[in-house]
Image: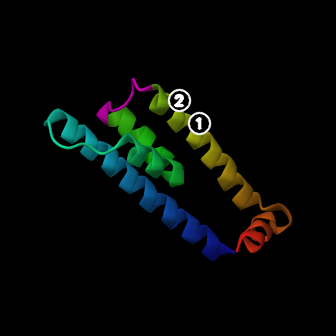
Amino acid sequence: MQEKFLILAAYLVAVNVVTFAIFAYDKYCAQHDKWRVSEFMLLMWTAIGGSVGAGAAMEICHHKTLHLKFKFGVPILLFLHIILIGVFVVNPDNIVEKILEKLL
């Protein structure tokens, strides 16, 4: 069971570091008139678990803070990620494993 938590933690750290870096890179590109990262790509990385990295980059880099899909979407995704992590941690009656078994 502890191995699952380590894998989840490593995944979340990696995804959030990459998401932060992508947001920061897009901000750099915006300031230097270079090709930008698509909003779809930014939101995709946020959705797959990078909501903390996205939120941190929005605050630190002051990037995408006026766009409604980011202003509201990132906190909503963060809330959903917290719920999913909570379900994974609490895992009543191995519900996560049962769901994964049905999907796979």
Disc assigned to residue 72: 2
Viewer-nearest residue: 47 or 104: 104
Dot 1: what SS? helix
Query: Could you classify mark 1 by the number of other residues whose Cα lies within 10 Å: few (under 14), some (14-19), or many (20 or more)?
Result: some
Q: Read off the magenta span.
A: 61-67
Residue 8: name its quadrant. bottom right
Instruction: Please name the predominant secondary structure of the magenta segment in the image.
Output: loop
What residue is at 53 percent from the left and 29 percent from the top?
72
Residue 20 against residue 75 in the figure, above or below = below
Viewer-nearest residue: 6 or 67: 67
Residue 92 at x, y percent in the picture: 83, 61
**Which amino acid, by three-letter code, is at mark 1?**
Ile
Q: Residue furthest right?
A: 93
What residue is at 78 percent from the left and 71 percent from the top?
102
Residue 4 against residue 79 in the figure, above or below = below
Dot 2: what SS? loop
Label 2 close to label 1 by CB (< 8 Å):
yes
Query: Could you classify mark 2 by the number of other residues whose Cα lies within 10 Å: few (under 14), some (14-19), or many (20 or more)?
Result: few
Q: Give the CA distance from mark 2 to mark 1.
A: 6 Å
Based on the picture, tell me whether residue 3 belongs to the magenta stretch: no
Question: Can you identify the residue that label 1 sits on?
Answer: 76
Residue 36 at x, y percent in the picture: 25, 42
**51 left or right of 85?**
left
Residue 61: name its quadrant. top left
**Which amino acid, by three-letter code, is at mark 2?**
Phe
Q: Quadrant of the N terminus?
A: bottom right
What residue is at 30 percent from the left and 45 percent from the top?
37
Residue 22 at x, y percent in the picture: 32, 49
**15 left or right of 101?**
left
